[in-house]
Amino acid sequence: MLSIKVKRYLTFANGLFECLCFAGVIFGWASLVFVLKKEGYFHDLCIPVSNTSHHGERNSTMDCDLQDQHFTLAFTLASFSLCFITLPCGFLFDYCGTTVTRFLAMRNFSEKGHITYPHCNLVYYLAFSASAVLLFPAACMIAGGGILFFTTNVQTGNLFGNKRSTVITLYNGAFGSSAAMFLLVKGLYESGVSLRYTFIFISCFSFVQICSTLFLLPRTQIPYPLPKVYSYGITWTHFGLKSSCQEQETMSQMKAVRSGDGTVRWTPRKRMELEEPDRQMFKIIQPDGGDGMEKEEMIDSLKTQTKGPGAEKDIPSFRSCILSKVFFTHLLWLSVIQLRHLLYIGTLNPMLNLLANGDSRQVGRLTNAFAITQMGSVLCAPWNGLIMDRHKRKGKPAAGASEDCATSQKLAAMKSAVLSLTITVTQAIMFAVCATIPVLEAQYLTFILQVVTRAFLYGGDAAFIALAFPSCHFGKVYGLMQALSAVVSLLQYPCFAFIQGTLQGDPLYLNLGFVAVLTLAYVHPINIYLRCRQETQRESTCTRRWVQVAAQQG
């Protein structure tokens, strides 16, 4: 049997693999569009236009604005599906657990297929340009299946304690880097490999995903904080066997208690916690004990004495979470940055054609550069998690008094997010400014900023929700947040139509408008900062009361 530590690292590696190869492939849309145009998708929508050169010669070109609009509409629907499907998936995940969520999704999607990455069976039909209309449901299924993998894998961060935010943001980085999969598809296509066979090969990884669901993920959810002894997945106990490792784990769940006659008995820790729910252990150093020994004293009902009536709080309800100011400002922060990000990806191919004056070689070169930079997302995202984890450890309340204040640990977690949220908005504004520069070579810098911004955006989004809201509501809050932001993301198609119509293909003024809109996202970190400052004052009052009561009891 695998040791618990090895199994946890296998779970981490498998989740990273799934996020890196399948979760966010839709973000490599520009590479796929390049291939689909070569295959002649929606080519019948292109209109021949006759032009007269300054030498008086007549030549004909193709006006493919309608073709670009169809590709943009497909990506708009796909990005909407990616975000909106997180809502039902989140509720299903919270109420039914990991295994049911993954297998039910496999069954639902397998109406057209048979695999864990189920949408690929429909994508097979994309090998024929005559069935180009199937691009719309296929793109939605690719996006929807991908976010399902991410949602069920992000809980792996709970296995790693203080590294939780780092793992979550690393998975988000892998989610963004999976855009490079369509670069691989493009490279194989240019090497002569059929688009159809490429997708069949990708679908063969379904066996790995089924095995990971059974052996490397829990039936329900990975709790946080993680219990001292925790196992998951199919183990030897399911076959009626018990390993020595499990026997040691069973003993570790027992606590030695010395009775009055000096004998020692072993009592289950869980039973002791149920029998003495309100007892707290405090270590008080005796001032005149010459040996400096620590004396342990049990202080009964200390919480009731110090908190006062009505101060004890239960876990916030889901309704109170979604009606909080933190939820709404985070939604604003996510929606405006995500809209700018998705609009850039969806309009990248026509924008490059505009800047390159229709030169397909330059467009192909820049498309490859864009896809390659997407792989850097997995390297950028963990920095956001490291920032949050490092500042959370700095602001973590001391053990003892502060631990029992209802808001102390949550306050330390939210403090750690202020810097991360501010950096993300600043990066988004820098990205939007670079995107307004109508110079082809400047797009290389824009590609880099886009990758860094997206890595911080999605990594910070999941990590912040995990920190600011109860873990029992994570799936629902995360899903609702994504669903509402998906509604906002539908504005990208009207924006593209506005560019093609009113602005006559030049997005300069719209890009400048987005720079101004993005500054609104600073409202979120400012709100969190002010909230933390108010809670700090409450916490200091609570801490003083703990010290006073502990001194009186001592």
Image (tube, grey):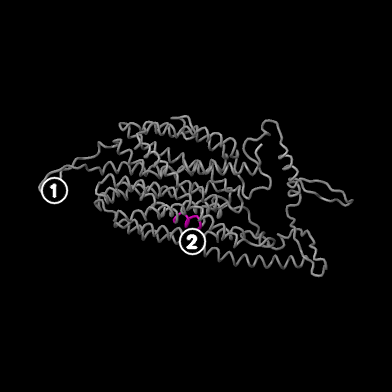
What segment is highlighted magenta in the picture?
A: 325-332
Is 79 in front, or is 48? 48
- Is residue 270 at least partly visible in the picture? yes
48 relative position to 517: left or right: left
Element type at marker 1?
loop
Q: Which mark is residue 53?
A: 1
Q: Dividing the picture into quarters, in which one does residue 43 lie?
A: top left
In the rendered view, would you say 461 is above or below 283? above
Q: Earlier in the sequence, mark 1 or mark 2?
A: 1
| Tag 1: amino acid | Ser
337 relative position to 508: left or right: right
Q: Residue at x 33, y 58 (%)?
A: 513
Which quadrant is the N terminus positioned in? top right
Counting from the top left corner in percent of width and height, residue 197 is at: 40, 31
The kind of secondary structure the magenta stretch mainly shows is helix
247 relative position to 356: left or right: right
Is 13 in front, or is 397? 13
| Tag 2: amino acid | Pro
10 Å crowding of disc 1: few (<14), some (14-19), many (20+): few
Counting from the top left corner in percent of width and height, residue 274 is at: 74, 48
Q: Dividing the picture into quarters, in which one does residue 289 lie?
A: bottom right
Counting from the top left corner in percent of width and height, residue 354 is at: 26, 50
Identify the residue position indicated by label 2 in the image.
525
Is 244 in front, or is 540? 244
In the rendered view, would you say 215 is above or below 415? above
